[in-house]
Amino acid sequence: MTDFLTTPSSLTEHTIQREGCMVHYWLAGPEDRPLVVMMHGATMDHRMFNAQVDALLPNYRVLVWDARGHGKSLPNLADITLETYARDMLAILDELGADEVVAMGQSMGGYITQKLYQIAPERIQAMVQIGTTPIAKAYSPLEIWTLKFTMPLFNIMPYGMFKSMVANATAITPEVKAYAVDAVNQIPHDEFLRVWKTITLAIDSKGMPDFKIKVPLLLMHGDHDKTGTIKRDMPKWPEIDPQVEYHVVPDAGHNANQDNPEVTNTLLLDFFKRHVG
């Protein structure tokens, strides 16, 4: 059983000063192997990929982080957009001299990887999306209103109640629920609202019809994922990017890579073998 409450000893912690925030990231693996960058979902942190770190080492170099406003990347004193997150990661990659990477994101981290590809497609060799939706899609006014309505709701909801809701919504296994509570406990309520505002601005009614992902793309979500429109929209993603590979992870919720790391890692390693090397 994977320990999600501590950082693997194989990882070395680094920091980079960005506008308004000291961003923390962790690195491991041989420098001559492809770099796999893994970006967590909202309210989570770098530990959500512990099972993938163990599986990918020593055949790949791995990087995980605490996105600004999460984990150890607090306090964050600057406004946040998806582009803010993407540019933070680009600064890390520049510092490492990493010209091309595999970008992997879960939930909000999936939005960030898509934005990263939009800004710098030449830096992305392949992409993995777990429990997220395409930012290129045009969403209905009702879907947008429903997402934005959560802002005032989360503003008045007791934070303790919210933390329990996050744990139950993101995972089905007790150990992952415990991790989710531990991760969200690090984030002040006001900072969470700023992060969530970023998510509400990630989709709109126009979409991006010209935005296409032209690198190998692996999609997966848990069979028990009830978050947003993920179970509806991920199977339709090939209508936007026809080259994608789509899988449903059994016995898993929103944090599918944690609830069922065995199936997730099998899919990842097979995909990497065929498309990354």
Image (cartoon, rainbow, N blue to C red):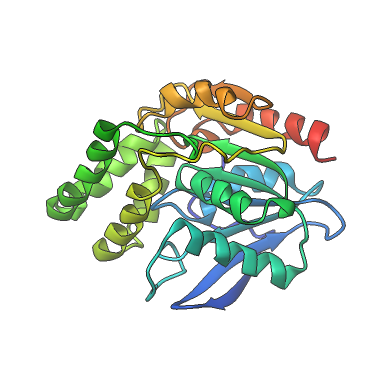
Q: Nearer the viewer, residue 203 or 61?
A: 203
Q: Nearer the viewer, residue 224 or 247?
A: 247
Give residue 253's quadrant in the image.
Answer: top left
For this orientation, the residue located farthest to the left is 156
Where is residue 109? Give x, y as percent: 51, 48
The answer to whether residue 3 is seen in the rendering is: no
Where is residue 83? Give x, y as percent: 50, 60
**Residue 191 in the image: above or below residue 172:** below
The answer to whether residue 154 is seen in the rendering is: yes
Left or right of 35: which side holds 202? left
Where is residue 227? Give x, y as percent: 36, 32
Give residue 243's quadrant in the image.
Answer: top right
**Residue 137 in the image: above or below residue 245:** below
The C terminus sits in image quarter: top right
Left or right of 32: which side holds 42? left
Q: Nearer the viewer, residue 179 or 24?
A: 24
Residue positioned 52% across, 36% down in the render:
209
Residue positioned 37% across, 55% down in the render:
198
